């Protein structure tokens, strides 16, 4: 079992719809969770961090964390073609601070 | 805030030469920086953790004599690819750890990456 798992996609949604990206992790003691966006040929860009159970909203983005079920998700409301990218879920190891990345979910928003 | 720069953004070199890549945290101090490599259509692969003032910690399978890392100041880490070969051609990305109010809130910010092509 991989430490962090995501559906590789591609996930295709129409413009204006809600895109839902999911991630599960295996280390129950993890405390820090991050979503990064990576456009093709570019480096990852931090979108959200979340540390507590529940929802965290930032503009059109909402991160959801459920530690009991060991999953974290990212919702993108009113999806735009410019949101088309690969979304990386990352979980930070408590020791050493390394990030463990999922394989990423490719999102395509169709006009 | 939390801006990380990398230089150069792109480099083409001949096989057998050495290439140095710089990673700088511009608006914060970073005691820890990380170096990643990414091949096309693949996820990020952590190469090493760079700690200011001490030796880098390399991930399993990464040759420390080939990928030399120096973290001489709180804002600068360098990666030198020695005796580069075509199979070293890749996208090299650094990140710097920005401290949060608690250890678990520390966040990594990524540089824009360096695309290395070895002929």
Image (spheres, rainbow, N blue to C red):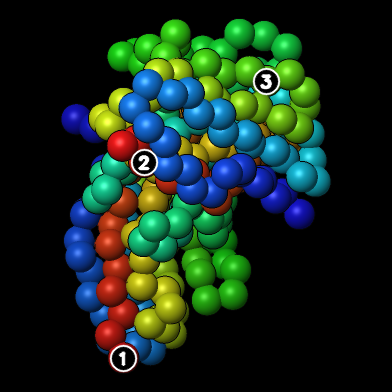
> Can you identify the residue that label 2 sits on?
B117
Residue A8: quadrant of the picture: bottom left
As helix, strand or loop, the secondary structure at mark 3 comes to strand
Report if residue A54 is visible in the image: no
Q: Quadrant of residue B79?
A: top right
What numbered label is drawn on residue A111? 1
Residue position for label 3: B71
Q: What secondary structure is found at the residue carrying circle 2? A: strand
x then y, percent, for residue A51: 56, 44
Q: Residues within 10 Å of mark 1 (few under 14, many from 20)?
A: few
- Residue at horizontal 57 percent and vertical 67 percent from the top: A57
Between residue B46 and residue B76, name the one nearer to us: B76
Percent across and percent down for residue A89 are: 40, 48
Q: Earlier in the sequence, mark 2 or mark 3?
A: 3
As drawn, is B41 to the left or to the right of A74?
left
Give the vertical position of A100 relative to B114 (above or below).
above
Residue A83, image x and y in percent?
42, 74
Q: Is residue B27 left or right of residue B47?
A: right
Query: What residue appears at the point 36 percent right and 41 percent down from the top-left corner?
Result: B117
Q: Are marks 2 and 1 on the same chain?
A: no
Are the residues flagged by discs 2 and 3 from a single subunit?
yes
User: What is the crowding at mark 3: few (fewer than 14 residues within 10 Å), some, or many (at least 20)?
Assistant: many
Q: Nearer the viewer, mark 2 or mark 1?
A: 2
* Label number found at residue B76: none
Determine crowd level at label 2: few under 14, some 14-19, many 20+ residues with C-alpha closer than 10 A.
some
Q: Which chain does tag 3 point to?
A: B
- Whether residue A74 is situated above or below residue B8 in the rendered picture: below
**Which quadrant holds the C terminus of chain B?**
top left
Secondary structure at numbered mark 1: loop
The structure residue drawn at horizontal position 57% and vertical position 44%, both measured from the top left corner, is B8
């Amino acid at each position: 079992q991989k430490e962090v798992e995501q559906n590789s996609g591609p996930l295709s949604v129409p413009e204006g719809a809600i895109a839902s990206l999911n991630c599960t992790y295996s280390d129950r003691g993890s405390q820090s969770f991050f979503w990064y966006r990576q456009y093709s040929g570019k480096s990852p860009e931090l979108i959200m961090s979340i540390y507590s159970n529940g929802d965290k909203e930032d503009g059109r983005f909402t991160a959801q964390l459920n530690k009991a079920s060991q999953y974290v998700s990212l919702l993108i409301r009113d999806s735009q073609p410019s949101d088309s990218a690969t979304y990386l879920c990352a979980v930070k190891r408590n020791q050493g601070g390394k990030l463990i990345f999922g394989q990423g979910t490719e999102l395509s928003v169709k006009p | 805030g939390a801006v990380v720069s990398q230089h150069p953004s792109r480099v083409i070199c001949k096989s057998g030469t050495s290439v140095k890549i710089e990673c700088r945290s511009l608006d914060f101090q970073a005691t820890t920086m990380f170096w990643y490599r990414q091949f096309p259509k693949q996820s990020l692969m952590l190469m090493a953790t760079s700690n200011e003032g001490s030796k880098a910690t390399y991930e399993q399978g990464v040759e420390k004599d080939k990928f030399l890392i120096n973290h001489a100041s709180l804002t600068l880490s360098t990666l030198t690819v020695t005796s580069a070969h075509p199979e070293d051609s890749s996208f090299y990305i650094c990140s710097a750890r920005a401290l949060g109010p608690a250890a678990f809130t520390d966040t990594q910010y990524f540089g824009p990456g360096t695309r290395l092509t070895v002929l």
